[in-house]
Image (cartoon, grey):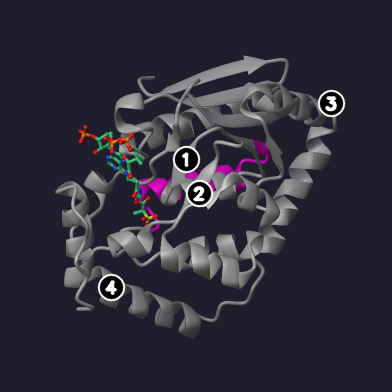
Amino acid sequence: MKYIQIHLDKHIGTITMNHPEHRNALSEVIIDEMINAFDELKEAKARVIILRAYAGAKVWSAGHDVKELPTPGRDPLGYEDSLVRVLRTVQYITTPVIAMIDGSVWGGACDLAFTCDMLIGSTNAQFTMTPAKLGVPYNASGLLRFMNILSVNAAKEMFFTAQPIEAERAHLLGILNHLLPADSLESYTYDLAEKISRNSPLSIAAMKESFRLLANASPLTPNMFERIQGLRRKVYDSNDYREGIQSFLEKRRPVFKGE
Ligand code: LCV
C-alpha cells in the first residue's frame, strides 16, 4: 500500500496514515487503503486497532481531499463518498479503534477521529471543523456524531466558527479521553491498548455494536430526514458551495454572498 502502513503485534494493530506531501488528506486512494487495512487486521484477529499519523506529523490529517469534492449539484458527503465509507467501516468493525493524535485534525478527519472509540491526544492535538469555511452542508449522521460527543452548543461553536479547539479544551470538552505530553503519548496509548487486548474480545465486540445501535437510536422520521436533505441540497447547489471549493484551490479567503 502507498499511503497506509499496517502493523500487528500481540493482538494490537496499528494503521498509520503516511502521505506527508498532502498532510494525510483523506483522498479516495488513502481511504480505500485504510478500509483494506481495517479488513486485514480484523481477519488477523486484532483485538484493538490504533489509528495514527506517521511519526513527527504536525498534521494528523487535513480532512477530506478538497480536490475530490464533487461539483455543485451533488451531495459532497453522500452515502458512497469515500470519507463516509471509512466512517462506516470504523463504526461497524467490532474491534475497538483508538485515534492517537499528535497534531492538527481538520474537517472530515475530525469526524474520522470522533468516530473512533477513544481519542488519546498530545498537547499538540487540535481540532478544526471546516464545512462552514468551505460552504459544505455537513450531513445528518456527522452532526449526530458530534452531538453524541459534545454538548450541542459546543458542537455548534465548532461548526459555525470553523475555529480550532486546542488540546486542553478538547480534553475539557470530552473529545480527548486522555491528554498527554507528546513524548509519552505513544507509550500511554499502547499501554491502554494492551489492557483492552487482555479482555474478552467477544464481550467487547458485542458491547461496541450495542453502543453503535444505541447511539443512533434517536428517532428520525422520513419527513425529518427529507427536510434535512432538502436544506442540504439548497447549499450544495449554491454558488457559495462553488466559491468555497474554488477559494481553497486558489489558496484565498472565500467571499460568501449567501446565494
Ligand atoms: C486536498 C490538501 C488538503 C485537503 N485536500 O501545508 O469537513 S468538511 O465538510 O469541511 C470536508 C469537506 C473537509 O474535510 O474539507 C477539508 C477540510 N480541511 C481543511 O480545510 C484543511 C486544509 N489544509 C490546510 O489548512 C493546510 O494544508 C494545513 C493547515 C492542514 C497544513 O498547512 P501546511 O502549510 O503545512 P499546505 O497547506 O502547504 O499543504 C500541503 C499540500 O497538501 C495539500 C495542499 O493543497 C498542498 O498541496 P500542493 O503543494 O499540491 O498545493 N492539502 C492540504 N490539505 N484537505 N489537499
Side (left or right) of 256 relative to 215:
left
Would the CB of label 1 be found within 8 Å of ligand 1?
yes
- 3 vs 2, front mark: 2
Q: Label 3 is placed on what type of residue?
A: Arg
For label 1, the residue is 104
Q: Label 2 is placed on what type of residue?
A: Phe
For label 2, the residue is 127
- 1 vs 4, front mark: 1
What label does residue 235 carry, if any? 4
Cα separation, mark 3 vs mark 2, equals: 31 Å
Q: Of callouts 3 and 2, which one flags the residue occurring earlier in the amino acid sequence?
A: 2
Side (left or right) of 82 relative to 187:
left
Would the CB of label 2 be found within 8 Å of ligand 1?
no
When the figure is inspected, residue 201 is found, relative to residue 256, above or below; the finding is: above
| Percent of width and height locating residue 99 | 60, 37
Residue at image x 45%, y 31%?
Answer: 58
Work out which quarter of the rendered image holds the N terminus and state it: top left
Question: Do tag 1 and tag 2 residues touch (Cβ < 8 Å)?
Answer: yes
Cα separation, mark 1 vs mark 4, equals: 27 Å
> Of residues 247 and 118, which is closer to you in this image?
247
Q: Of callouts 1 and 4, which one flags the residue occurring earlier in the amino acid sequence?
A: 1
| Percent of width and height locating residue 197 | 78, 27
State which region is magenta: 78-97
Q: Label 4 is placed on what type of residue?
A: Val
| Percent of width and height locating residue 71 | 18, 58
For label 3, the residue is 198
> Of residues 219 and 154, which is closer to you in this image?
154
